[in-house]
Image: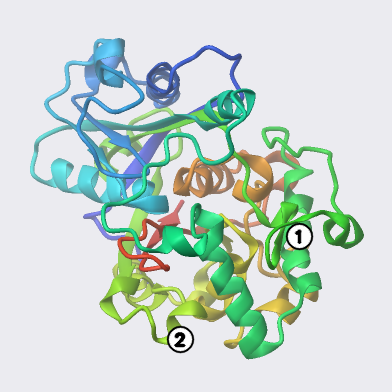
Amino acid sequence: MTGRSSKENAIAGLGLVLDPKPGFTARALEAEAARLAIEDAGLKLQDVDGAIEGKLAAGPAISAESIDAFPRVLGIPFNFFFSVGRGGTAAALSIALGAKMLELGCARYVAIAIGMTRRTRSRRLREKGEVGAAGHIPKEGQYTLTFGATRAASVHSLLASRHMHEFGTTCEQLGAVAVSIRQWACKNPLARMYKRPLTVEEYLASPFMVWPYRKYDFCLVSDAAIAIVLTTADRAKALRRRPIYVAGIGFGEAAAQDWWQKTSYTRLPVRTAKEAAFRQAQIELRDVNLAQLYDCFTAEVLLQLEDYGWCKKGEGGPFVQAGHIAYGGDVPVNTGGGMLSAYYMIDFTGLSEAIMQLRGDAGERQVKDAEICLVSGHGGEILEPMCSIHSTLVLRR
């Protein structure tokens, strides 16, 4: 591992709004998280001159959930505002775009925020007697609905079942993922599952939702918002908080291969994302102290452990079952509880935990000597099943 590049950008502020009282819009939550991030950085609202909104899918500035932009709510004199995202890679995409705008001189400080009210919206659906994801609109030409692929779990479960077929992965090993990550959540006061331990026995007793996924294989839904302030490394050094440097960003694309090739069900498009991010950061896997892996479902964690190289292909189940990623293990993964047990904010969940860990602010769950953290993102199928994007973000203190 070599020294830090002078071209790096840095995260200078972090703001979180978790489990607010009912009634807040996603836009209001974004605005509050951005205000907290700007305050955390020791800046004034007037210092911020760029803004980016992370979303599950790219769209116009006036989104389906709001009729205005969060920087306007705050009165930020911004030079630009964009919405960016595809599946669970919105944080990485937003940081990549923000870094380019800083390089071009279009801004000095960029506020990046995401807000969701999915828990409230899902509750409203249930009250109407409906079942499903809030705001889900089938894609034009979608042919999988006829076969029952109506929600994310319908296609993501194919990864788990194929891995079980190919490598003998067991339900107990999927449960070990949920149990291991829950151990970390039990140490995190910000997690929804704080002090609510889970055992493999409880996991196995929970109902099947989409085989082989049970209740605890699913991530949470949340009302929340997360925001950061991104700036250049030089500017960040003069601010209030320890800078967290953006050392590398990379992306991979499952749509680059034919979806009917069975290898696409047991591998995520990690290779090009990892290679690009690690090359920029000038690191190898052994330099990574902890990882925040995208855990929309449990099998994705197994695949990433294999695809990044912590264990061989097909050995993810035994690797987790042996306790490697659990609290106290030698490969700390999803140290805040991830989306399975803390809060669902796509890859912003892992980003927020990475910042807290690298700052040394993680309390009881703090990983000793945390210097380099990997944050991954996944999702955004452009063709079902599972033609997804993958992102690798390398952060260092």
Question: Which residue is situated farthest in the right direction here?
Answer: 201
Residue 32 x %, y %: 43, 17
* Amino acid found under the numbered disc labelled 2: Thr
Q: Nearer the viewer, residue 14 or 17?
A: 17
* Amino acid found under the numbered disc labelled 1: Ser
48 in relation to 243, above or below: above
Q: Nearer the viewer, residue 40 or 266?
A: 266
Residue in view at x 11 percent, y 25 percent: 79
Residue 381 x %, y %: 36, 60
- In the rendered image, which quarter contains the N terminus? bottom left
Residue designated by label 1: 180
Residue in view at x 23 percent, y 42 percent: 98
Q: Quadrant of residue 232?
A: top left
- What label does residue 156 carry, if any? none
Assign a secondary structure to mark 1: helix
Assign a secondary structure to mark 2: helix
For label 1, the crowd category at 10 Å Cα-Cα, with few meaning under 14, some 14 to 19 and many 20 or more, is many
Residue 46 x %, y %: 23, 14
Residue designated by label 2: 263
Q: Earlier in the sequence, mark 1 or mark 2?
A: 1
Residue in view at x 56 percent, y 28 percent: 125
130 in relation to 275, above or below: above
For label 2, the crowd category at 10 Å Cα-Cα, with few meaning under 14, some 14 to 19 and many 20 or more, is some
Residue 262 x %, y %: 46, 86
Question: Which residue is situated farthest in the front direction here?
Answer: 146
Q: Is residue 343 left or right of residue 365?
A: left
Whether residue 315 is visible here, answered yes or no, is no
